[in-house]
Amino acid sequence: MSSTQPLKLTYFGIQGPAEAIRLALAVSKTPFTDELIPGTEWKANKPMNSPWGQLPYLTLPSGEVYGQSDAILRYVGRLTGLLPTDIIEEFKVNELVGFIQQDLRDRKVGRSMSIKDPAEKAAYRAELNDDVLPKMLDSLVEKMDESGFLCLGHLTIADLCLYTFLNWISMGVVDGVDGKALVLGRPKLLGFMENLSGLEGVKEWNEEQRKGKIPIDFRA
Ligand SMILES: N[C@@H](CCC(=O)N[C@@H](CS)C(=O)NCC(=O)O)C(=O)O
């Protein structure tokens, strides 16, 4: 790849852990190629250029390739100003990113994806929906300020993580979890989603880039 080419993010044609990265690039108007790999192509050709045998991965203009979604998100966050350079501000953002990505997305909702037994899965999801997620989301809401963002009074990668997580659980793809109700029942969270959805770059990305390709909005 020549140095005149933009960043290239390679992932499946779903939101997953790539969507916060895509949004960070989109809202900051950083040119990038959004390479969407069909599952069949991945199965036939993996690991392609992936350094960890997984998607997503990011190809830099220099041709260097890096994986791991959180590392890519933080790199892109720094590149776009959505991850502050001040060490304490960065700490605040990363603390929220950890809670959203590791605890909410991976340890709680993500873990339920691998439960094979239908009864066990239904019971786990019911507890998730009725008890675990409400408590975790309430603890997040308590920490939010009045700015409409999670912290620092402006958009950061933590906001994009929460926005994409809440969109995901609101799409009806996680059976037993009513993400829409969890958002609609919390005015501050609803305000957050309205704020994020209305940001010029997010709106543009959702309307223009995603139309008909990937479901994008918690109300859809
Ligand atoms: N820790 C990795 C996990 C990536 C991951 O689990 N990728 C999945 C898709 S979300 C994948 O590549 N699955 C296909 C495969 O493993 O062959 C990251 O955050 O980037």
Image: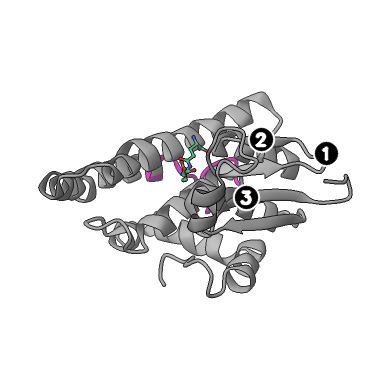
Q: Are marks 3 and 2 in contact (CB under 8 Å)?
A: no
Q: CA distance from mark 1 to mark 2?
A: 12 Å
Q: Position of residue 8 (x, y in %)?
A: 71, 50
Identify the residue at image location x=67%, y=42%: 58
Q: Is residue 67 left or right of residue 194?
A: right
Query: Which residue in the rendered view is the most extreme toward the front?
Result: 44
Q: Which residue is mark 3?
A: 10
Identify the residue at image location x=69%, y=28%: 86
SS for dot 3: strand
Q: CA distance from mark 1 to mark 3?
A: 16 Å
Residue 153 forms part of the magenta stretch:
yes
* Residue type (three-letter) at the residue carrying disc 3: Thr
Q: Position of residue 135 (x, y in %)?
A: 27, 42
Numbered range of the magenta stretch:
141-155
Q: Position of residue 129 (x, y in %)?
A: 22, 51
Identify the residue at image location x=46%, y=66%: 217
